[in-house]
Structure formats: C-alpha cells, structure tokens
C-alpha cells in the first residue's frame, strides 16, 4: 500500500457526499411544516451561523435516508474501507444531521459536525480534523471553502469542483481521485422548467380556433404573448411545486429523478429562477391586458393552493386540476376577446377531469406493480382504483355526450357548413379516450396523459384526423 492509502480519508457532506445542501433543505422543511418559525430565522441568523444551524436542526427532522447520494463516491469509499482505511465524515452541517447520515450509510469511523458553539467550516473544520486524525489525511471536498483543508492535506479527492478550484488544488496538493458529474446544465433547466408541459397552455388558443378567428393576426399575436406569459408563470409554479415536494418526489419511482429531487440543480438557484420566471410571466400578461393578468393571478392562486393544501385531499386534487385546464381556455377567451360557449366549458371540465384521473390511476397501477398500497404525500390507495376507474371512464363518456349535444345545437348547425362531419370527431374522441384508459390499465401510461398523447403515434394520428374533420365540417359545404 502507498503512503497516501495509509492516511485517513476525510469526507465532506454537502455538495460532496450528497449533491444537496442539508441546511437549505432543513430551512425549506421548517418553512413547509412550521410556517410561523420563518419569522424566527433572521433572529437566529443574527446570533451566528453556528446558532442558526443548531436552531434549524432542532426545528426540522431531515429525512437523510431519502437524500440523494453520489453512488460513484460511495462505491469508492466502501472500497477504501475494505482496504482498512479510516473514514471520517467532517461537515459544516449540524452534528445531528451528520450523525444521522453516518448511521444510515454505516460507513464512517468518526463523525465531525457543527454544533451551537462551533461552525465547522474552513479553518475551523481543519482544526477539528487535525484533532481527530492528526496531520496526515486525504480530503474529499467540492468547494472553494475547502481550499485551506486541501492545502493541509496529503492528498485531495475532487468531487464536481469548478475548474478554478480544481486548478488551485492541483497546484498545491497531489490528486488521489476526481469525480465529475458531466451533466448538461441547459437540459437540466429545460427539465426543471418542464417546457414539454407548455403544450397544456396551447389551450389558450382554443377559443381563437373554435371561433375560426386564427386569420386575425392582431388577435393571434396577443394570444401568442399570453401563451408565453402563462407558460413562464406555469414553469415558475412547477419549480416551486418541485421544491415543495422534495420529500414525496424522492419516494416516487420516476419523480425522484427530477432535477431538484436528485439535487442536480441547487435549491437556491431554483428559488431564484422561479422568481425570475414569475416576474417575466406577469409582465407579459400585463401587456396582453389587465383582465388577462387577473386570470393569470387566479391561475397562480389556485395552483399555489393546490400545492400547499388541496393536493393532499382525495378527488379534490383531480377536480382542481380539471378546473385549471378550463381556466386556461377562459384566459384564451379573454386574450383573444372572443366569447366562450357553455358547450366548450362543459366539455373541458368533463374531459380534463377524466385525464386527471388517468394520471392518478396510472400512478396507482405503478404502485400495485411494485407491491405497494399507498402513495406518499397524497391520500390515495391502490384499492381506490375500483372507484376511480369507472369515475374516469364515465367522465370521458360525459365529455363525448356534451360534444354530441353541441353538434345538434342550433348555433353549431348555423356556424358549420357541414356539421354532420363533426360526428367523426365524436368517434375519434371515443377511440382516443378509450385508448388512454386501456394504456393506463396495462401500466403503459406516462404519469401525464398529455405528454403520453404527444409521444404516442396512435394518439397523434387520432387528434390530427379529428382536427381535419373539424375543419372540413366548417369549410366544406354539404352536397
């Protein structure tokens, strides 16, 4: 064994062993579970970072088992442990968090963490390391704050460090190993913004299309502006929702890979990004009209209430989701300054209630396949499928019935040159909605049915044919 391999291996926690910041996560958890404690945070901070961390740790109960850990680094540490190397967890995080992590991983011989009197960062951490293992050690870290420790170490292990920090460390300390993330940041932000979800906001164009006013360039330009305003604001809410749901997302088979749940994007950057997107969305909405801005604010209020409260109540959550879709249509009507028929609103409520239930049922089917019975963070159980299934299918059929009544209405007969062709659309709706529910039953449904519809060839072709039939019914005379 080399001289380096005989030295103790001291490992940092935040940003290194786990890519997240446990202090930020703890503060977020306190804000979520004890909102009134938020007013105490500035007072704690004025007393110093050590006291701040201690008070936050006492007010929170971070679930260290669900935290994302760097698997490649863990494998390396376990290999070094088997070689007989002493492993020490040394972190600026509170000692309660450090001890919990060490207990969960069952890997470290010693644990060093901050307490009410000491903030174990930089030089303070270096002093604690020397007292614990002596002057000979290798250090595993990630940030500029670790430079004094690397300079005193016999070897350095770099974990996803910046180029400037890595250059400084290489100039002073032998490099034992390097771990790099290699993640495309641009793609991560696109995922965090859920740009693919912007297609839901295409519903804003529906009133313009149903009024066959898409040749009015002024109205079209206004609706496009409204679309981007809604989309940017919606992305802000998606990011806020992901930050709010970190715990439940990390216990979900697919959502645990989201950028914030996996800690591929920092929480603080997410908060800043969400605020910037929200401001941009509101400015664009105001440029459409004050009424449209009011619709967007109503949408944001409902989504925020959904995130903080309503999503945990069975059935109420899917009802709210269906209403949010309908709100988009009403907002489009406001932006385009065209009237929205009661037929369209009734149709949208039923069809989107069915699609929201598709989403819930697909999650419960996936739950059953994994042998689990209850969801995390939502009041749903696998046994609820016996109720949700017929409720969702019947809601889909109600939407078709409403569409059929719309075809036979006097207004439709007057506005369409060949309204009988709309029955082809009704048949397409029956096929498409039934297809979604069959895919759900087979466990092949994406957790968002609209995303699935875009990716599914059969759904794309059906929607395209329904669109052609609608245009033909309006423009082609009956002969």
Image: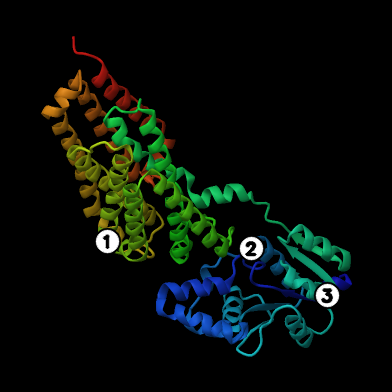
Where does residue 448 sit, x and y in percent of width and height?
39, 47
Q: Residue at x 26, y 30 (%)?
A: 211
Q: Which mark is residue 76?
A: none
Q: Is residue 68 above or below residue 350?
A: below
Can you identify the residue that label 1 sits on? 314
Where does residue 105 sit, x and y in percent of width and height?
60, 73
Q: Residue at x 53, y 57 (%)?
A: 273
Mark 2–mark 1 distance (CA, rounded to whole Å): 35 Å
Can you identify the residue that label 3 sits on? 153
Mark 2–mark 3 distance (CA, rounded to whole Å): 22 Å
Circles 2 and 1, Cβ within 8 Å, touching? The answer is no
Q: Residue at x 51, y 74 (%)?
A: 27
Q: Earlier in the sequence, mark 2 or mark 1?
A: 2
Q: Earlier in the sequence, mark 2 or mark 3?
A: 2
Q: Residue at x 31, y 52 (%)?
A: 321
Circles 1 and 3, Cβ within 8 Å, touching? The answer is no
Disc 1 is placed on an element classified as loop
Residue 405 appears left or right of 344? left
Circles 2 and 3, Cβ within 8 Å, touching? The answer is no
């Amino acid at each position: 064994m080399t001289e380096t391999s005989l030295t103790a291996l001291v490992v940092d926690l935040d940003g290194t062993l786990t890519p997240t910041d446990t202090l930020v996560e703890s503060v977020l958890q306190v804000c979520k579970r004890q909102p009134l404690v938020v007013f105490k945070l500035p007072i704690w901070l004025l007393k110093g970072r050590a006291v701040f961390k201690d008070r936050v740790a006492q007010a929170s109960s971070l679930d260290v088992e669900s935290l994302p850990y760097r698997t490649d680094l863990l494998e390396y540490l376990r290999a070094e442990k088997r070689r007989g190397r002493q492993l020490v967890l040394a972190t600026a995080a509170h000692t309660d968090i450090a001890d919990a992590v060490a207990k969960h991983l069952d890997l470290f011989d010693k644990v060093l963490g901050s307490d009410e009197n000491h903030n174990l960062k930089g030089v303070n951490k270096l002093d604690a390391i020397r007292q614990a293992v002596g002057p000979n050690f290798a250090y595993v870290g990630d940030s500029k704050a670790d430079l004094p420790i690397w300079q005193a170490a016999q070897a350095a292990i770099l974990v996803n460090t910046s180029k400037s920090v890595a250059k400084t460390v290489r100039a002073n300390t032998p490099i034992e190993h390097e771990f790099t993330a290699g993640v495309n940041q641009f793609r991560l932000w696109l995922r965090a913004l859920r740009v693919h979800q912007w297609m839901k906001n295409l519903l804003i164009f529906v009133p313009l299309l149903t009024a066959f006013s898409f040749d009015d360039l002024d109205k079209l330009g206004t609706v496009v502006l409204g679309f981007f305003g809604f989309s940017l604001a919606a992305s802000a809410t998606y990011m806020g929702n992901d930050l709010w749901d970190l715990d439940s997302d990390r216990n979900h088979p697919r959502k645990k890979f989201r950028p914030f749940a996996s800690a591929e994007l920092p929480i603080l950057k997410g908060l800043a990004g969400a605020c910037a997107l929200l401001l941009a969305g509101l400015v664009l909405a105001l440029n459409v009209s004050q009424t449209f801005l009011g619709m967007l604010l109503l949408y944001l209020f409902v989504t925020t209430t959904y995130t903080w409260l309503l999503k945990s109540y069975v059935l109420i959550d899917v009802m709210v989701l269906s209403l949010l879709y309908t709100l988009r249509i009403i907002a489009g009507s406001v932006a385009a300054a065209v009237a929205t028929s009661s037929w369209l609103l009734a149709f949208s409520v039923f069809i989107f209630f069915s699609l929201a239930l598709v989403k819930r049922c697909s999650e419960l089917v996936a739950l059953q396949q994994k042998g689990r019975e209850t969801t995390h963070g939502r009041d749903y159980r696998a046994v609820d499928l016996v109720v949700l299934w017929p409720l969702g299918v019947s809601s889909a059929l109600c939407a078709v019935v409403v569409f059929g009544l719309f075809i036979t209405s006097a207004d439709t007969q007057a506005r369409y040159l060949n309204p009988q062709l709309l029955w082809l659309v009704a048949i397409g709706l029956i096929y498409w909605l039934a297809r979604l529910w069959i895919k759900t039953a087979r466990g092949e449904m994406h957790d968002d049915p609209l995303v699935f519809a875009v990716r599914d060839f059969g759904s794309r072709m059906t929607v395209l044919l329904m669109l052609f039939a609608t245009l033909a019914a309006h423009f082609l005379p009956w002969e």
